[in-house]
Amino acid sequence: MSATTALRALHDVPDLNVPDVGVVTVWFANGAIGCIANTCMLRMGYTVGLHVLTPNLIVELTSGGVKFLEPNRTEEIRHQRNGHFCESAVFVKAVRTKNQALIRSDYADAVKTLAVTLAALEPAEKGGVPVPVPSVRKVPFRLSSNFRQASRLLRREGATEKEQPKGKGDAC
């Protein structure tokens, strides 16, 4: 993987110490190439999404829904719920009830995601020089102990589930 970042637009923000733009290029084992671009420089809302391009299909997953584009057909499915709210609500419920089954991605997946994230930081700090993503063979912690810790933290902080903002879709 390779990455580069820069501070290009937000020079006027006091004490800003992070880049405002970045891009990561990922080479997958099967030969596919992925590009992850990010920015915090926009002074307005824009989009968050995942676009997958193949010769005969484009999939656009955004906060508003998913769109499938084929040479002679387009299908769009609009989200009926606010995905970010639902993810947060399900996570808080899973921690409070100590029900790991509510989480669709396990702790091992989270560790792999962290490995990719940390691997992306290294080339960004070294001027884009590619680095391999380390193999994650063993998960260092048990999820159940982390759920207990998170549950204690929620109780100690007095965290409460908030109502979903109106107009953002159905409850989860």
Image: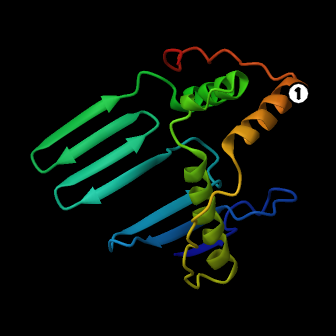
Q: Is residue 50 above or below residue 10?
A: above
User: Would you identify the image quadrant in which residue 97 lies?
Assistant: top right
For the point 45% across and 47% down, the residue is 49
Task: Say above or below: 67 vs 120.
Answer: above
Q: Residue furthest right?
A: 156
The percent position of residue 133, horizontal first and vertical second, equals: 55, 73
Q: Does residue 146 appear left or right of residue 82 in this picture?
A: right
Spot occupied by residue 116 in the image (x, y as percentages of width and height): 58, 64
* 167 or 128, nearer to the observer: 128
Rendered residue at 52%/42% (across/down): 105
Tell me which colouring the rendered structure shows.
rainbow
The residue drawn where x is 81% and y is 23% is 159
Q: Quadrant of residue 90?
A: top right
Question: Residue 19's x, y, as percent?
Answer: 70, 65
Classify mark 1: helix, strand or loop.
helix
Q: Is residue 161 left or right of residue 72?
A: right
